[in-house]
Image: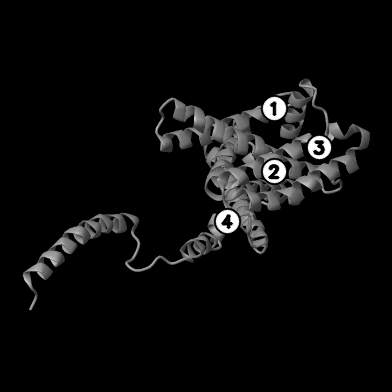
């Protein structure tokens, strides 16, 4: 049984300790930490969780895997141009590549390796800015190539549907697939051109133009979904028109124009949903399948 003096001392102790308990409990709840001593390895475990490998669908949309897929195609094109063209290499460069080099030359930048180096820097800068892990499994690259080929076959199907649509509208219209040159496998020059078109047309009209159009539309307070749709459609429209611009430019026909517009929309959505690398792979595979192999439904 406690004496009155002991009870008074105990009461004073409770008055001191109770406020301490009340102050600590809200702090624990706010930090979501379990009761008990702090774990010294908590940050290490959290870091390991963040370093877990991404799925194939997430990894392939990142800049570094895209660069790993695009770089061999780009080097094959650049070396092929030097090999086939020699001193007149500029004459066999593909349209988007030639346009960008013309703009750079007007600024006094004439080094032949500047455009491919600029593309590498853009993708590496994107990787750094994304604050993502730089590691990825090289085994995803063959799957990316396979996916690109599947999407290219799907685009051949789209072109066939457009062909049938125009055939219904005009019985005497030439087929849309004639917008792509007939196979010329006796020379490697067309094949080299298809490699360059896949890289530089996607770099110009998708990697550069789609984000710029989207940003401008967002500055005008356009809703995100509508801004995405308009950026995709607008870049595709410019992509189609570009094939009829310049000298020499392809003669304008509604068949070729509409087909390339739809193809531009297709490539742009592949870029938005699946990433730059898959877009380049799809464009290159399609051009080779139709222009080099001569395959269509």
Q: Position of residue 277 (x, y in %)?
A: 64, 49
Q: Is residue 217 left or right of residue 171?
A: left
> Alpha-carbon distance for marks 1 and 4?
41 Å
The earlier-in-sequence mark between 2 and 4 is 4
Label 3: which secondary element = loop
Q: Nearest to the eye among marks 1 and 4: give it.
A: 4
Q: Nearest to the eye among marks 2 and 3: give it.
A: 3
- Residue closest to the eye, 155 or 67: 67
Residue bearing the label numbered 2: 198
- Residue 2 vs 156, above or below: the answer is below
Label 4: which secondary element = helix
The earlier-in-sequence mark between 3 and 4 is 4
Residue bearing the label numbered 4: 59
Mark 2 and 1 residues: CB-CB less than 8 Å, in contact? no
Q: Nearest to the eye among marks 2 and 1: give it.
A: 2
The earlier-in-sequence mark between 1 and 3 is 3
In which quadrant of the rendered view does residue 78 lie?
A: top right
The earlier-in-sequence mark between 1 and 4 is 4
Residue bearing the label numbered 3: 113
Q: Quadrant of the N terminus?
A: bottom left
The earlier-in-sequence mark between 2 and 3 is 3
> Alpha-carbon distance for marks 3 and 4?
28 Å
> Alpha-carbon distance for marks 1 and 3?
31 Å
Q: Position of residue 157 (x, y in %)?
A: 58, 50
Q: Which residue in the rendered view is the most extreme toward the right?
A: 87
Mark 2 and 3 residues: CB-CB less than 8 Å, in contact? no
């Amino acid at each position: 049984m406690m004496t009155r003096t002991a009870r008074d001392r105990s009461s004073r102790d409770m008055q001191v300790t109770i406020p301490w308990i009340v102050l600590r409990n809200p702090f624990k709840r706010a930090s979501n930490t379990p009761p008990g001593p702090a774990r010294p390895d908590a940050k290490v475990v959290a870091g390991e969780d963040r370093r877990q490998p991404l799925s194939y669908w997430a990894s392939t949309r990142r800049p570094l895997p895209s660069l790993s897929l695009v770089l061999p195609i780009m080097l094959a094109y650049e070396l092929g141009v030097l090999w086939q063209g020699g001193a007149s290499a500029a004459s066999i460069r593909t349209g988007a590549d030639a346009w960008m080099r013309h703009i750079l030359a007007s600024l006094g930048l004439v080094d032949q390796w500047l455009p491919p180096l600029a593309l590498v820097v853009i993708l590496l800068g994107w990787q750094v800015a994304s604050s993502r892990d730089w590691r990825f499994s090289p085994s995803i690259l063959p799957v990316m190539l396979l996916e690109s080929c599947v999407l290219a076959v799907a685009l051949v199907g789209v072109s066939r549907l457009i062909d049938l649509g125009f055939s219904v509208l005009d019985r005497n219209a030439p087929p849309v697939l004639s917008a792509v040159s007939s196979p010329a496998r006796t020379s490697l020059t067309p094949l080299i051109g298809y490699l360059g078109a896949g890289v530089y047309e996607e770099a110009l009209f998708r990697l550069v133009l789609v984000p710029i159009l989207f940003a401008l539309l967002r500055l005008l307070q356009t809703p995100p979904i509508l801004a995405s749709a308009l950026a995709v459609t607008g870049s595709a429209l410019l992509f189609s028109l570009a094939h009829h611009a310049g000298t020499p430019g392809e003669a304008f026909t509604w068949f070729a124009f509409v087909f390339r517009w739809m193809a531009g929309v297709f490539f742009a959505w592949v870029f938005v949903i699946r990433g730059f690398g898959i877009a380049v792979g799809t464009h290159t595979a399609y051009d080779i399948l139709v222009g080099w192999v001569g395959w269509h439904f």
